[in-house]
Amino acid sequence: MSKLNILDFGADKSGESLSTAAIQEAVNKCPEGGCVYVPEGVYISGALFLKSDMTLFIDKGAVIKGSDNSDDYPIKTYRWEGEETECYASLINAGIGADGVQNLIIDGDGTIDANGVVLFQKEMSEKKGARGRAVCIRDSLNICISGVTIRQSPAWCVHLINCHNVRIDNVEIHTKYDESGIRYKDIFNGDGIDCDSCRNVRVTNSLISSQDDCIAIKSGKNAEGRAAAMKSEDILIENCRFESGFGVAIGSEMSGGVRNVTVRDCKFHNTFSIGSVKTCRGRGGVIEDILFENTELLNTDTEFSDCKWFRGGIYVDSYYSNDEISKEKQPVSEETPIIRNITFRNAKVDTCGGNAIYISGLPEMHSENITLENIYAVGRYGMKAYFTDGLIMKNVTVCAREGEDYIFEEATRN
């Protein structure tokens, strides 16, 4: 494999001057199957654009750190919160504003630091576009990210859009606290990984400490998402640790559909949830065939409590972002979301943050075939279920620290 050392192209390992041009030149000159090598040191960079059939190898002790100048991130079109939107470019980009890439590897024991605390403030105040991400790859095939630490993004940390065959293994992502536990200031929407209309994705053996959803599975929003009709499907999240944030979320932007997602053998500490399936009227689309199994949650963090944005340790919510549950039916249309065939199996939940378990469909479109099996769940509140058909409970114990253990209302049927 041909290896191109960025120092040979004039990169500054001291972190005192900008190395964007040097790193980008190495990328541009990297032959097919070659490697751009980032040795130990701190390299200040603006947006970098990777290409097909290459490896970006960030060695131990090496940091690619985002420039604090927002002008170093040109405005490009990305999907953001489910819709195509002008955004500041991310620190690491592929397939943006051009044809997608294939056979791209990001590897090593080094760090991608997006300098999000500074850029968040600048990008929010300038408002030239939505905030950039640490890593964004779109319309691409055969992507592997392994070994690296990715931290401090202005918004979502790793954003994959319409990608097929993705492997993320043994990575660390820190969007709320740095590795020593110091909290980043004034960053929100700090998801760890967003799989947005992606197929055949594997996230394994990784640590995610997030300010928002640890991993979010999305597929576009409302009419635009339905028209694009690009599902997220065949996704496995396995043997991962989650240290803060809101666990693994399906939605809320899911208008293209989400199917066949498995989360297993994962541990959650001070996350609000193990898993959430969340949507609302207007989205349309179908979420189906979702499995969470062999998971544990211990949440002693009192920062967040039950509200319209998050409901509990395990939850399925068709009223996401609504303050109250409306009991009045609305006409069923392409805007009506469907949730069906959701299973939580072999889970232990102990949370102070909200409901132990919460399930709600819509009065005009009940959630269907929700299975809870071998669950022991303790919450501030117990279990609540509304507008659900085919609720199957096998060996389920729920304990509420406040109020009733179980509340089944509004046409919830077994």
Image: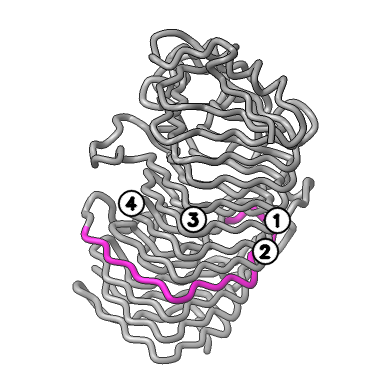
For marks 2 and 4, the one nearer the N-term is: 2
**Which SS type dominates the magenta stretch?**
strand
- The residues colored magenta run 279-300
Front-most of residues 180 and 85 = 180
Q: Residues within 10 Å of mark 1 (few under 14, many from 20)?
A: many
Write down the quadrant of residue 350 in the picture.
bottom left
- Give the labeled residue for mark 3: 320
For marks 2 and 3, the one nearer the N-term is: 2
Disc 1 and disc 2 in contact, CB within 8 angstroms? yes
Q: Residues within 10 Å of mark 4 (few under 14, many from 20)?
A: many
For marks 1 and 3, the one nearer the N-term is: 1
- Give the labeled residue for mark 4: 244
For marks 4 and 1, the one nearer the N-term is: 1
Residue occupying image coordinates x 45% and y 85%: 373
Q: Position of residue 377 (x, y in %)?
A: 31, 77
Left or right placement of residue 138 versus residue 229 in this view: left
Q: Secondary structure at mark 1?
A: strand
Q: Secondary structure at mark 3?
A: loop
Front-most of residues 177 and 57 = 57
Disc assigned to residue 199: 1
Q: Amino acid at mark 4?
A: Ser
The mark closer to the camera, 1 or 3, is 1
Q: Residues within 10 Å of mark 3 (few under 14, many from 20)?
A: many
Q: CA distance from mark 1 to mark 2?
A: 6 Å
Q: Amino acid at mark 1?
A: Arg
